[in-house]
Amino acid sequence: MRQFDFMSKRRAAFIVSIVLTIVAIGALVIHGLNLGLDFTGGTLVEVKYQAAPALDSVRQTLEAAGYKDVSVQTFGASNEILVRLQQSFEAGIGNDIVAHLQATGDSVNLIRAEFVGAQVGDQLRDQSGLGMLLALAVVMVYVAFRFQYKFALGALISLGHDVIILLGIFALFGLDFDLTVLAAVLAVIGYSLNDTIIVYDRIRENIRKSRTDHMPSIFNDAINATLSRTLSTSGTTLLVLLALYFLGGDMIHNFAIALIIGVVAGTFSSIYVAAALLLVVGLKRVDLIPPPKEQFEDGAP
Amino acid sequence: MLNRYPLWKYLVICLVLAVGVIYALPNLYPEDPAVQISAASGAEAIDQQDLDRATSALENAGITPKSGELNGSTGLIRLTSNDQQLRAKELISETLGDDAIVALNLADATPSWLASLGASPMKLGLDLRGGVHFQLEVDMDAAVKQRLEVNASAIKETLREERIRYRGSEVDDGTLSLTFSDEEDRSKARSLISRDFQNFEYDERDVERGAVLDLTLTAAAVKEIQDYAVNQNLTTIRNRVNELGVSEPLVQRQGPNRIVVELPGVQDTAAAKRVLGATANLEFRLEAASDTPASEMESFAFRNQPSRTANIMKDVIISGDSVSSASTSFDESGRPQVNINLDGTGGSIMNRVTRAAIGRNMAVLFIEHKTRTRTVMEDGEKVEKRIPYTEKGLISLATIQSALGNSFRITGLDSPTEAKELSLLLRSGSLAAPIYFVQERTIGPSLGAENISRGILSVELGLLLVVLFMLARYKAFGVVANVALTANLAILIAAMSMLGATLTLPGIAGIVLTLGMAVDANVLIFERIREEMRSKMPLHQAVHTGFERAFTSIVDANITTLLVAVILFSIGSGPVKGFAVTLSIGILTSMFTAIMVSRGIINLAIGGKTLKKLWI
């Protein structure tokens, strides 16, 4: 089995991570997340045309009918149109819009109509941010309890790294961030942590049984030993996610993208960020093996 | 002895697998599109004759139903395709008339031997079968205000009985203010009120030419009122949904002041909203007599004749809450009327009051709470403001000929439709506080069907890819992992069906994701076995150690993921909850299958044999 010297390249990896994180934070600050209807509130109507319509003419038809702040875009197929309105909901708005669009002589069907009150959106946004922080905190406490606080710190930073990069990519490309994507982000936290813990578990085991105090070589052994497992699991997970991305339909598209990004970032971070951070925080053998008790203390004169 | 399981472990594995397969099976039988017929309240139960009439009406129109069955007092007609459902519903409604409520339904097609074991398929969420999802918010401030107003009437009644004179009363911003002419009256009133009414906090202030007593509800009382308002609204909405005749509706409280309503199969959201959100109520009051002081009476216009007004008393005899049943009919001259039956207390109050007021007029006041939504600019941001307002109008003013009892009728309604909706509202009870729609989702049936077929396709392809991957990588052990994976899928689906979990689109995504991650435990074990083999450990020992050593890693890794899933469940709503449930169950089942089932198969295959080579 080939052994890779991961730890010697940790500086290069840190630079990559830091650059990615800065770009991600920059994208988040400049563009911000393109929050979906779930978080912003508003009205959304999805309709299906027989043949692809011109988006401008759809917009003009609706504005002529008296709707304000209309945004029209295709959703998945070119003949499926998503209409967003900032105005508040009226009963049967979906059918009204279909009627207006049909008046121009096209054949239009209503697929779905959604309305989320502004207040609900605000609440959900706060709740979600809180949930994400809570997830990180709980996980950190668990790791600190099962391993040691230095491990918890490493796990936390590497999870934060994955989540920030994931959110940054969503901000950079203006992808819709809705409730299902939030679910994906939390799943990524779970997945990435899973990876990290497997590596940590091995590091702990190797520190306990090895006689050397040279941490980088212990870490290298541990990462190499778990490498084929890490790649196999990421591989199978990526395979099913690709199936979901290509076949799952438009409503699940961004969910799949978020998880794909998350799995890739999580795999990288569990090798480089999480393990290499243990060197930065100065993990020592004594952190895991309590020093032997001095039994002769009392007997001293 | 290495790598051998005692018999009981094999039995446990077989039992779990058998249960898993049996309870997962019903999901393979797609549900039939169906039309459900139930009797409208007050009408006679649906019988075989009605069912035959409906079936023959369908056959005449060229729709051949799959089957028709009678379960107790409801009939169910199964159809062969979704396209026929709407047409069939219309036809049956026409044939059976108003006595029957016809609703679209999906009927279980589970074979009877499975159904007799209690197995049933997973319920499909709205995003998979189409329908409407509403989220309603209960107006808590209005609930408190209403209760204060009721209390105000009672307090004034008490003050009058004790001959304590007050000059005015006002309910504003959660406070009831009573004005007295001097402090002596105020302190008498205060001790009287605190004797008869708990739940108040008192505040005294002096104004020009008078003394004011401010009554504010205690925090505990406010909370109790709000809880009561939400629960009462929940019951009322449930009743109304039942009157709408939707099959398998969901009405649930969410958070402190929200109610979620899901109506599968309903496409006409406007009608559903009108009935669910209506806050109409009735009040019965006496007309003011000629000597009634102005502070005791109010003036209202008639609903159908806005120019005509009448002065009526402020005190309410009874309100719509006391109605026990209501139905519509037509009077002698063909005008619509609502027949009302009161409950015991309502009846005796009505009797007591009318007995003393023969010859006077009684007014029926129709009250409707409505809201206007207006978008205003506030700090440079658009903010939606709801401005509640109440519409009150008289529907009838009739002379009391004799003391009224438990049942009487109301005339003076505009149309039969109005009479019908009023009686429905009276029957289902009024809302204890106004409600607003804060969220609404309508999912068309075609989107639902597409979501299902795409979901199933991605589960199939995902499973296939993982199976091929594991075979290529771990050969014979890959076969074991694949058997465990398939068992995992069956147990996962069985567990979700048994728990009555609802399958949503994110739920399907959760299943697909679980498939990818479920092999993780097997991968960990197999890699460990390979490692031990490389360090020249005897083969049996290697398998044993591989399972042993991988165990703590598997548990640690899965518990943390489970923690995240639990948090996801607690913050998520609707579809996201579905994802969290799937993920959590998937983690538990995958631990069982990857550790127990695959170990069982391996032990069965190699246990007690001399090994020269392991196909891993």
Image: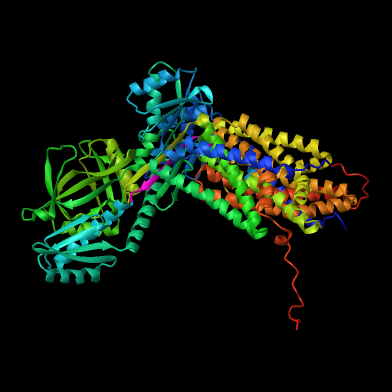
The magenta segment is B126-139
Q: Nearer the viewer, residue B588 or B534?
A: B534
Q: Position of residue B439 (x, y in %)?
A: 41, 40
* Residue A251 higher or lower than B588, as above or below: above
Q: Can you see residue B22?
A: no
Q: Residue furthest front?
A: A301
Q: Residue furthest left?
A: B291
Q: Position of residue A247 (x, y in %)?
A: 62, 30
Q: Residue furthest bottom?
A: A301
Q: How is the image coloured?
A: rainbow
Q: Residue at x 62, y 47 (%)?
A: A158
A295 sits left or right of B561 in the view: right
Q: Nearer the viewer, residue B371 or B386?
A: B386
Q: Residue at x 57, y 51 (%)?
A: A136
Rendered image quadrant of residue A66: top left
B55 sits left or right of B564 in the view: left
**Magenta highlight on residue B131:** yes
* Residue A25 higher or lower than B565, as above or below: above
B369 sits left or right of B11 in the view: left
Q: Residue at x 24, y 60 (%)?
A: B151
Rendered image quadrant of residue B110: top right
